[in-house]
Image (cartoon, rainbow, N blue to C red):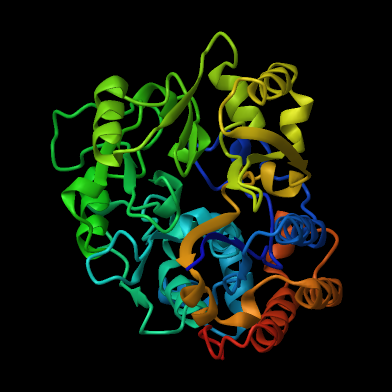
Amino acid sequence: MKHFEANFDGLVGPTHNYAGLSFGNVASLNNAALTSNPKAAAKQGLQKAKALADLGMVQGVLAPQERPDLYTLRRIGFSGSDAEVLQKAAQQAPALLNACCSASSMWTANAATVSPSADTRDGKVHFTPANLVDKLHRSIEPITTGNILQATFNNDRHFKHHQHLPEHTSFGDEGAANHTRLCSEYGHAGVELFVYGQEATNPSAVKPTKYPARQTLEASQAVARLHQLEDESCVFMQQNPDVIDQGVFHNDVISVGNQNVLFYHEQAFLNTDAKFDEIRRKMNADMHFVKVATSQVSIDDAVRSYLFNTQIITLPSGEMAIIAPTNCQENPAVFAYLNELITLGTPIKQVRYYDVKQSMQNGGGPACLRLRVAMNEQEVEAVNQNTLMNNTLFTRLNTWVDKYYRDQLTVSDLADPQLIIESRTALDELTQILKLGSVYQFQ
């Protein structure tokens, strides 16, 4: 039986904007208040997804969240008609309105943690939506995320869906952005590497001092239990608090893995050697730990270019390729390193560059935009086929974007009642295109 690692990219929502909501995310803060282009952002994401499908990869899409989120605004005391709710929120609590208009669900690396059937005791693919409690604008996502995942992976024989973890900072969970699966082959049992920023229930444990550590050890351990993972298939590793304080808000900003390759910055982790030894022992297969030294690429250059927020994919030929943002080409140190990397004899033989600047300006690169799901061919067949990228879907989604998305959006536009109508009409049509059923509260 064939096995694949599918990528499911988040469709960029109609309210894509730069409100600077993500404290600890340097790009998000630096670009706050810029004018965004939702149409360009959505088309850039679709181009990347279609490019991977054209390379022979299994590629899908996940629907965005409904925004503005009027239900949350009503829940916190704003009343009246939809237009009145928006107007009152804009006048009395603009920061709360901005949070309820975020299109951050486009970064589906934060949507959930996924464990493939080869690793789980019951032989099913397990999904746990991330609770994202560290950021208000993301903490309102998990219920709808769960609905969308269940409508996409909608076969109980093959897929197991869990509720998100308790909404408390002790269980801060950021999903696959802090989770990497290592294996010899996608269909073989592997090692799931859970990277955390702090141990929440241990007051004396080391943690960052400037920016928040969004992922806790307790959350990672809880997900491993829910997914029926054996101890021998899990490694829990702490991210270096110093790099979190330099703007590395998720592990996928400082390392990325694929099969038997872990590509990482030398400052990425604590206790690196001991944990790598544990990975080697549990993998029982050849591992390639590809270290980037600070002398080659500084933390600042890594964060600005998103060198590690790239995708490493295994092409049908068996070669590995890095899917990088064009920002990596534009950074001299990073571009020079990537040109050298493909000559070093590692499994990584190619680098391909894609323009995702609308996403990059808000703090998310190619790896943020996708949720990885390792599956066998029967499981791929059990996926909602209407969500899998092909020529027809690509054309239809581009037409849909052209019909509903704006070319420009400023933070002040978020109070426009017309935006609600545009967004809901667009999402209602999208659920019909993707055959999702009713996944939104307004439906």
Q: Up-down: is 221 above or below 122?
A: above
Q: Up-down: is 309 above or below 1?
A: above
Q: Up-down: is 64 above or below 118?
A: below
Q: Quadrant of residue 229?
A: bottom left
Q: 21 left or right of 270?
A: right
Question: At x 42% / y 59%, what residue is drawn?
Answer: 187
Question: At x 59% / y 47%, what residue is drawn?
Answer: 314
Q: Quadrant of residue 243?
A: top left
Q: Up-down: is 258 above or below 413?
A: above
**Where residue 45 sits in the image (x, y, percent)?**
72, 57
Q: 50 left or right of 21?
A: right
Relative depth, front residue between 321 and 206: 321
**Where residue 136 sits in the image (x, y, percent)?**
44, 56
Question: At x 19% / y 46%, what residue is drawn?
Answer: 232
Toward the front, the furthest residue is: 1
Residue 207 visible to an observer of this rendering: no
Residue 418 visible to an observer of this rendering: yes
Question: At x 69% / y 16%, what residue is drawn?
Answer: 333
Q: Quadrant of residue 432?
A: bottom right
Q: Quadrant of the C terminus?
A: bottom right
